[in-house]
């Protein structure tokens, strides 16, 4: 991938370190180029001071303006070269930051797509959107500033100090001693700022998740008459964020003030010592002026580093957040297994003793030594109470998560279901399918953009959407999704079914597809869905037991374990857990 940082691994566990920047592609070249340009800049700074001091002392000693003409030209040439170097450094650093951060965003998004809904649920959409948009912009700023500032701090003060030492040892000693004091103050203030910044990020994360949640649930909140109360909560969270931002800003002002104060104090020391020796006649005006002009330049890189520190801290923090979102998933060991073969009528899938836990800190396994063997176009019903592990099981089959123990085989070969070749064989219908803000036609054809209009119409007909398409003023081109015509829950689900008809993939996963629908809508949809099941391996996770008539076998999950599995008849005869579930549901009805 062009611009891909060579060593940049989004999957690096643990926190991000500054030195990791050096492993990014182009970083070493940038450091080398910046070092050469900074050295040139440093020499120009010294020349500038020398010529300026020369001009002033010449005029002071009574020479005419025409005498200093040559020095003035040299001064302006040095000035021009200095700012030219600064300009070039900025441009190359900007390009590096732009390339690296956009690569990071791409890789982060690719990783999120690969991790799928499990990561989205865990992190919260608002937080992820903030990280991807704002976080990456802050990382860009950090990358842009970090290398030039580091190089400038490594070269310019040393170069200037060396020159001052040659000219006047005492001034050199004053400058040498005051620098560590300045740096110590910066570190102390930096540590305080870091703490504030951590709190600020945590509060921002709450705010963004809260905001996205509120937008999504706005209609529900209004129906319940709770929108005012919720608005107050948002305003409270925003206010906390505002006061945290103000605290960080206060600290930023304080540190700027401290920096300025100490720099001025150090320069004043140099000026006083030079002045006293000038009065005593122990020093000439020309070198004294040169040193005085150079003293602020000596502190300038450190001061700039201090000023930008708060801006770069945001970027560094965002970088850590980016890593920490991905790191827990990288802890799961990746299996070096090949991609499964294309599923067909005589394929077999064997799951042997597979377990999964959401992070190492979770006490309970979400899936505990799952055993299951399915073949061909079987229809498997997955039932169990809420929190039993049905969705996690569907995520395992879809390859969104990888098991920590056990093995999965397709046609008796160990495979990795996280492989994209497996995912391309799967259609997934969740409880709330996502409708893009696009026409009905584009929504149906989203996963099969090469489909012809006739094929799309066939899929829409098969999903029972014909009737509503006829009622739409723009027919197939009617805009749905956010900002478009609202659809009922059943109609939304039919759009998902139409997509599945159009893709016609051999494996179908359904996770509570009708849990939010009223019973009439569900029965209407059931007939359409049953047609969709034909010629496919189907896993249907639901707690609505009437679907089990359509299933070849039923797996009962409880506490992450498959407690019973068999045909409906076998399970009823067994009078075990499934029988108990049926009985309690019937008791609920009668
Ligand atoms: P079901 O679909 O049967 O309601 P799930 O598969 O969603 O159950 O959840 C199984 C268990 O895993 C539950 O105890 C749930 O709290 C936990 N769980 C689900 N998703 C996550 C997650 N993203 N992070 C941590 N724990 C989770």
Image (cartoon, grey):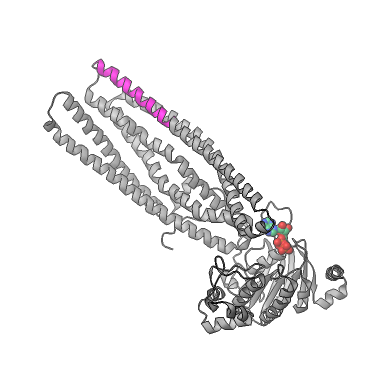
Quadrant, the C terminus? bottom right
| Quadrant of picture, ligand 1 | bottom right
Estimate the x, y position of residue 299 in percent, counting from the top left: 37, 33
| Front residue of 232 and 119 | 232
Q: Judge whether 265 appears above or below 475 on screen.
A: above
Count of numbered circles on the image? 0
Q: Judge whether 245 appears above or below 455 on screen.
A: above
| Front residue of 345 and 431 | 431
Q: Main secondary structure of the magenta part?
A: helix
Check if residue 274 falls in the magenta segment.
yes
Q: Quadrant of residue 406?
A: bottom right
Estimate the x, y position of residue 255 in percent, counting from the top left: 46, 33
In the picture, measured across the screen, residue 250 lies left or right of residue 414, that is left
Asked whether residue 470 appears in the rendered view, the answer is: yes
Estimate the x, y position of residue 250 in percent, counting from the top left: 50, 35
Check if residue 334 falls in the magenta segment.
no
Q: In which quarter of the image is residue 506?
A: bottom right
Identified at 75% across, 72% down, the residue is 519
Estimate the x, y position of residue 68 in percent, counting from the top left: 15, 32
Asked whether residue 355 appears in the rendered view, the answer is: no
Q: In which quarter of the image is residue 183?
A: top left
Range of residues picked out in magenta: 258-280
Identified at 43% across, 41% down, the residue is 308
In the picture, measured across the screen, residue 82 lies left or right of residue 503, that is left
Quadrant, the N terminus? bottom left
Taking the view exactly as shown, the residue that stands out farthest to the top is: 280
């Amino acid at each position: 991938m062009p611009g891909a940082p060579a060593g940049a691994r989004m999957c690096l566990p643990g926190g991000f370190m500054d030195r990791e920047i050096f492993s990014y592609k182009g970083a070493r070249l940038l450091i080398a180029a910046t070092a050469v340009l900074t050295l040139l800049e440093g020499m120009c700074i010294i020349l500038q001071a020398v010529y300026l001091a020369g001009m002033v002392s010449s005029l002071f000693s009574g020479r005419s303006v025409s005498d200093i003409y040559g020095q003035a030209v040299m001064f302006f040439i040095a000035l021009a070269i200095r700012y030219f170097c600064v300009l070039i450094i900025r441009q190359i650093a900007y390009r590096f930051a732009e390339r690296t951060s956009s690569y990071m965003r791409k890789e982060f998004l690719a990783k999120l797509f690969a991790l799928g809904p499990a990561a989205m649920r865990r992190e919260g959409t608002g937080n992820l959107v903030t990280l991807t948009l704002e976080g990456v912009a802050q990382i860009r700023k950090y990358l842009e500033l970090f290398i030039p500032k580091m190089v400038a701090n490594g070269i310019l003060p040393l170069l200037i100090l060396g020159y001052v030492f040659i000219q006047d040892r005492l001034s050199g000693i004053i400058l040498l001693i005051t620098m560590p004091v300045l740096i110590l103050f910066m570190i102390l203030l930096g540590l305080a700022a870091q703490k504030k910044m951590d709190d600020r990020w945590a509060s921002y994360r709450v705010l963004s998740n809260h905001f996205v949640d509120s937008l999504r649930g706005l209609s529900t909140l209004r129906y319940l008459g709770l929108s005012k109360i919720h608005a107050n909560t948002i305003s409270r969270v925003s206010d906390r964020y505002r006061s945290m931002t103000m605290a960080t800003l206060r600290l930023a002002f304080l540190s700027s003030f401290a920096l300025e104060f100490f720099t001025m104090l150090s320069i004043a020391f140099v000026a006083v010592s030079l002045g006293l020796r000038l009065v005593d006649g122990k020093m000439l005006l020309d070198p004294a002026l040169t040193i005085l002009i150079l003293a602020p330049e000596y502190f300038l890189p450190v001061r700039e580093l201090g000023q930008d520190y708060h801006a770069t801290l945001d970027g560094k923090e965002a970088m850590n957040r980016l890593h920490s979102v991905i790191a827990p998933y990288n802890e799961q060991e990746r299996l070096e297994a090949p991609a499964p073969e294309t599923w067909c009528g005589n394929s077999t899938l064997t799951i042997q003793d597979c377990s999964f836990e959401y992070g190492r800190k979770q006490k309970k396994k979400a899936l505990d030594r799952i055993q299951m063997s399915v073949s061909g176009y079987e229809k498997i019903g997955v039932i169990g109470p809420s929190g039993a592990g049905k969705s996690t099981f569907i995520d395992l089959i879809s390859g969104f998560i990888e098991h920590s123990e056990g093995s999965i085989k397709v046609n008796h070969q160990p495979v990795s279901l996280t492989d994209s070749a497996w995912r391309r064989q799967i259609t997934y219908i969740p409880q709330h399918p996502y409708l893009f803000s696009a026409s009905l036609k584009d929504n149906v054809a989203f996963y099969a953009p090469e489909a012809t209009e006739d094929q799309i119409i066939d899929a829409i007909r098969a999903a029972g959407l014909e009737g509503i398409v006829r009622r739409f003023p723009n027919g197939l081109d009617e805009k749905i999704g956010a900002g478009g015509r609202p659809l009922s829950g059943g109609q939304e689900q039919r759009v998902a079914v139409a997509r599945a008809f159009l893709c016609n993939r051999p494996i179908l996963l359904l996770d509570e597809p009708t849990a939010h629908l009223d019973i009439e809508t569900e029965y209407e949809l059931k007939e359409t869905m049953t047609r969709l099941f034909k010629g496919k391996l189907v896993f249907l996770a639901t707690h609505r037991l009437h679907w089990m008539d359509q299933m070849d076998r039923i797996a009962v999950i409880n506490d992450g374990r498959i407690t019973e599995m068999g045909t409906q008849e076998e399970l009823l005869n067994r009078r075990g857990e499934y029988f108990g579930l049926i009985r309690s549901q019937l008791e609920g009805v009668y």
